Image (tube, helix red, strand yellow):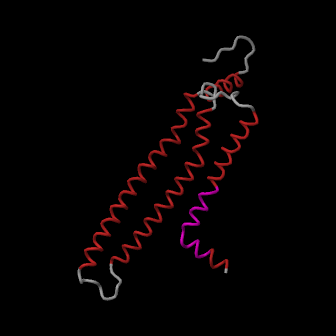
Amino acid sequence: MLKCIERCDYGKAVSDFVLSFMLHLKFRAVFSVLFFAPLLLMLIIYMHIFSIVRRHQVNRLRFSQINHGSRHHSSNGHGSSGSNSQQMTRSVKAIHTTLFILGSYIIGWMPAVLSYLLFCEDCLFHFNTFNKSVMFFIYTIVNLLVIFKTLLNPIIYAARMHEIQVRFQTRRH
């Protein structure tokens, strides 16, 4: 409860309370879970997807070796193995795209979250640990990385989509 003895500006008292609460490690650690929980979930999901694709690749390789040894090939050369190969290529490309997005997420947000956790009233580094120009430099780099990450995602998707690559090449020529 906020107490005012004489003249009290409740708006200022509430904003000071909220600001002081946000400057402490306990709040910052809880708030940082919004970054680390999705990161952990994405890593688990992508490791699972990667293991499924690897298992599928091993099975395809084993099947093609068995099938290669037998004399049962289709006469036109267009069997299910061609479509499976195309599907595998698309799956691997999709995995690479999602890994690029995950990498941009880590590069873009990890420095921001770490600086948020390291610089506060009761954190490892107090706000007055470094001079103002060093802090300005740190926060400028952190903000630029977040902006860079935001700009990078559409570029990653555009560079990885075949339709956009073809359209870009036709406009260039």
In the image, residue 2 above or below residue 104: above
Which residue, as the protein is rendered here, is positioned at the far top? 5
**Is 164 part of what is drawn in magenta?**
yes
Q: Is residue 83 left or right of residue 25?
A: left
**Number of marks in picture:** 0
Residue range of the region highlighted in magenta in the rendering: 151-167
The residue under the point 68% across, 27% down is 15
Give the x, y percent position of residue 131. 74, 31
Give the x, y percent position of residue 56. 33, 64
Which residue, as the protein is rendered here, is positioned at the far bottom? 75
Give the position of the N terminus as an image quadrant. top right
Judged by its main secondary structure, the magenta piece is: helix
Residue 66, image quadrant: bottom left
The residue under the point 36% across, 57% down is 51
The residue under the point 71% across, 31% down is 130
In the image, residue 42 above or below residue 136: below
**Is 136 part of what is drawn in magenta?**
no
In the image, residue 121 above or below residue 111: above
